[in-house]
Image (cartoon, grey):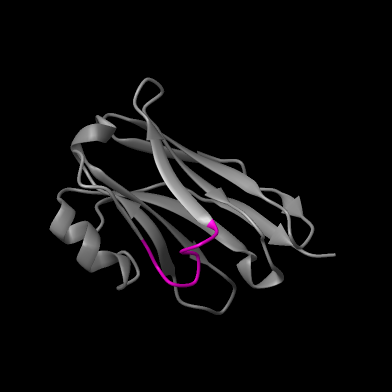
Amino acid sequence: EVLLVESGGASVQPGGSLKLACVISGLTIEDVCVAWFRQAPEKQREGLAVIYSGSVGSYYVNSVQFRATIFRDTAENTVYLQMNNLQPDDTAMYYCAAGENNHDCYSGLGRGGLTYTHWGQGTQVTVSS
């Protein structure tokens, strides 16, 4: 059974930082691509960043490109998303998802995760003063 479990969400003030974790079981994270998405109330799900399988690298959308880092810890089978300079617009439920191949992961990031096959339950991030 494949299971993705997110953690690390919290309430922070503007300008703060968070490190979100996605612990994956049933898959080897080097062999799959993993992305982070978020969804705010009454908004569509938005892809933020993806780390590809193998040594291909990662990709970020414009809204988080210079203040987010996605990386994996193979010993812990965990993918992290470090977010800095958080603002109220970053308030949302954050989800991690895994895809079967890098092409599907790249194409699905901008399509709300349509091509991703496994999802976690989410972790809430709230940014307010």
Q: In this view, does 44 lie above or below 91?
A: below
Q: Is residue 115 visible?
A: no
- Where's residue 24, x and y in %? 37, 33
Dominant SS in magenta: loop
Residue 125, picture quadrant: bottom right
* 2 inside magenta stretch: no
Q: Please report the residue visible at 66 percent of the width from the left and 61 percent of the height from the top.
A: 86
Q: Which residue is drawn at 30% across and 73% down?
A: 111
Residue projecting furthest to the bottom: 42
Q: In which quarter of the image is the N terminus?
A: top left
Work out whether 30 lies above or below 96: above
Q: Give the range drawn in magenta.
A: 60-67
Whole-percent x, y for residue 22 in the image: 45, 39
Note whether 87 is above or below 79 in the view shown: below
Res. 122 in view:
yes
Left or right, 8 with reference to 56:
right
For the point 14% across and 50% down, the residue is 101
Q: Residue at x 41, y 50 (%)?
A: 96
Residue 68 appears at what percent x and percent y?
51, 55
- Residue 65 painted magenta: yes
